[in-house]
Amino acid sequence: MAHAVIWIFVALVVGIWTLMAWTADSVLNWPGWSANALAEWPLWLDGLRPPVWLAPWLPQEWLDQSRAWLLDAGPEIQAWLQQTPDLRGLLGFIVWTVWLIGAGMMLLMGIAGSALVKLFQPKKVSDAPVRPQP
């Protein structure tokens, strides 16, 4: 039972780790990060809506403040993007390399946890009768 708990936990953590890497890769490789695409930034922000299942949990004033902050930061982001080279391909490689290292470490932790459970598991007593020594 302990082995199952360890490996379910490892699977959940690796799943969350994968979701975070996928999200980071999607955000970093968004085509809107190019310096020319930021002219459409206000239109994109107006159409930005949270998912239906998440909308009731987010206060509207928080969403409005976030949009206003992003609109104010747009010119600064555009200036920064014009000064830096386009590294989207390299950043994706870095994200997935970090994911691979992290997933490998989590796999090793799962193996170590199973080994510890096996090490500290009580030994089974056999049902065979003990012969007296002559």
Image: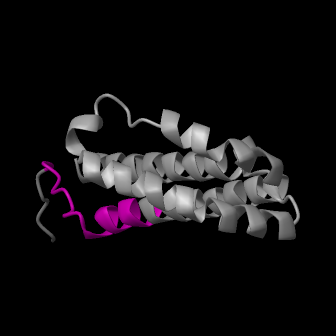
Question: Which one is nearer the viewer's eye here, 121 or 97?
Answer: 97
Evaluate whether residue 84 shows in this view. Answer: no
Q: Is residue 102 left or right of residue 49?
A: right
Residue in the image at 45% along x and 56% along y: 68
Question: Which one is nearer the viewer's eye here, 32 or 95?
Answer: 32
Magenta span contains residue 119: yes
Q: Is residue 116 left or right of residue 130?
A: right
Residue in the image at 28% along x and 36% along y: 55
Magenta span contains residue 118: yes
> In which quadrant of the rendered view does residue 90 lie?
bottom right
| Position of residue 27 measured from the top left corner of the image (x, y, whole percent) | 62, 49
- The quadrant of the picture occupied by the C terminus is bottom left
Question: Which one is nearer the viewer's eye here, 19 or 56?
Answer: 56
Please give the range of residues in magenta: 111-128
| Position of residue 78 measured from the top left corner of the image (x, y, whole percent) | 73, 61
> In which quadrant of the rendered view does residue 56 lie?
top left
